Image: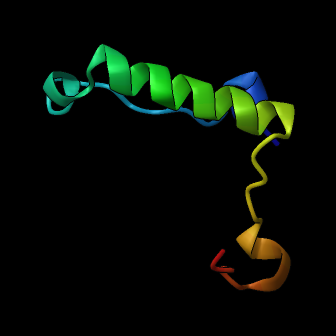
């Protein structure tokens, strides 16, 4: 399976959203992505128990 660490999941940037994708938003998204890859942010796997926990 491909995930964030190997580029299988990422954001899509095109002419429809390029204007709202500021350098600040890109930095925040890239920081969150790095924290998920590093394990600092835990992302729940819905398929593991068919639930979306609210924290």
Q: Is residue 23 left or right of residue 36?
A: left
In the displayed structure, 23 sits above or below 20; it is: above
Q: Is residue 40 left or right of residue 9?
A: right
Residue 3 visible in the displayed image: no
Image point (14%, 32%), residue name? 16
Q: Name the image quarter holding residue 10.
A: top right
In the displayed structure, 41 sits above or below 12; it is: below
- Residue 52 vs residue 1, the one in the foreground: 52
Image point (27%, 25%), residue name? 21
Residue 12 visible in the displayed image: yes
Q: Is residue 20 left or right of residue 50?
A: left
Point out residue 2 in the picture as x, y percentages from the top left corner: 76, 37
Q: Quadrant of the N terminus?
A: top right
- Residue 33 vs residue 13, the one in the foreground: 33
Please, which colouring scheme is shown? rainbow
Considering every residue shown, the one lying at the far top of the view is 23
Q: Name the image quarter holding residue 39.
A: top right
Q: Name the image quarter holding residue 32.
A: top right
């Amino acid at each position: 399976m491909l995930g964030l660490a190997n580029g299988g999941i990422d954001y899509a940037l095109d002419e429809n959203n390029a204007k709202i994708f500021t350098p600040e938003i890109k930095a925040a998204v890239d920081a969150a992505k790095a924290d998920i890859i590093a394990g600092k942010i835990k992302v729940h796997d819905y398929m593991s128990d068919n639930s979306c926990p609210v924290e």
